[in-house]
Amino acid sequence: MKRTSCMDSFRYMLAVAVALFVLAALPVSAAQTLTCAVTPDYIPITFSYHGAQLSITGQSAPTDDLIVSIISKSTDTALKYQEKVGGLVWMKKGTLEFKDAPGVYLLHSTADLNRILAADERNQHLLGYEALRGHILIEDSKGNPATGNWFDEYLKFKKNEKVYDIQEGTVLRQHGVEGNTYQAKVAWPYQAPPGVYTVEVLAVRDGKVVDRASSNFEVKSVGITAALSKMAFEQAGLYGIMAVVIALLAGFAVGAIFKKGGGSH
């Protein structure tokens, strides 16, 4: 009996040792699940709305680089362009269509994208402006491929609108007893239209995307703003009349204020 008990104890200790060895042999990153949360997850558009500050947080493997992206669904966008005539006067010359172009394109990363991610991976996951350049098709009004630096002009336009932005080295990491956490602060532009948006976090290791996590947030018009927006689409005539009336009333109010101020001197 005593010998059997000793053998059982030996087998138990051997099993524990093997289990510990297997756990130690696993990659460190396998012990940490990639997660993603966004705060706030609801942004109301009111009269005082001027964008918002998003906080993207979660847990990740300690050795992986991270890319936080908010890329809206690709659409076709038509833009008019101007050219100088006679070297003096700017005139509208035509329309260009930018096909499969995201309306919103915001990226944050732990480090330089070109350093942490291979070129084929950047193109596959549409990460970086050069990947966008190869993805967006630009055509003239006749459907022919447009020549010239129109992508650069389009990119400049979107950057000025604050809806395209890449910030490298802005995803901050912290290692602690409760796990390895990250945080990214994203300035959400008021120019972005209402809708449901997806925040996606990609884990990068050895130049490749190895894991991903996502979370959604909603931007929605509320109150009078929502009512006016609905009216603009469904009752365009009435909306136009109201806009004119409001502008006239505002003009009268400003005039009355200045007149009163002038009379007091």
Image (cartoon, grey):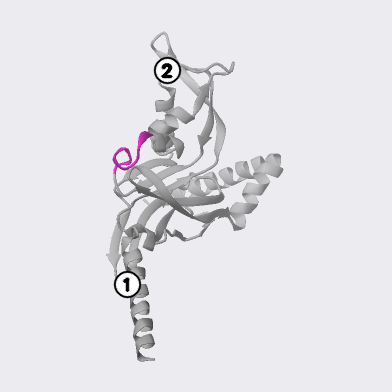
- Could you tell me residue 20's position as x and y percent? 33, 69
**Circle number at residue 17:** 1
Task: Look at the numbered disc 1 and give the secondary structure of its residue.
Answer: helix
Q: Quadrant of residue 99?
A: top right
Q: Main secondary structure of the magenta part?
A: helix
Q: Residues within 10 Å of mark 2 (few under 14, many from 20)?
A: few
Mark 1 or mark 2, which is nearer the start of the sequence? 1
Give the magenta-colored segment's residue range: 112-119
Write the residue at 62% across / 47% down: 229
In the depicted structure, whether residue 37 falls above or below residue 98: below
Relative to 1, is 63 on the left or the right? left
Write the residue at 41% across / 8% down: 86
Is 116 one of the magenta-colored residues?
yes
- Could you tell me residue 200's position as x and y percent? 46, 51
Is 203 one of the magenta-colored residues?
no
**Circle number at residue 148:** 2
Q: Amino acid at mark 2?
A: Gly
Q: Quadrant of residue 1?
A: bottom left
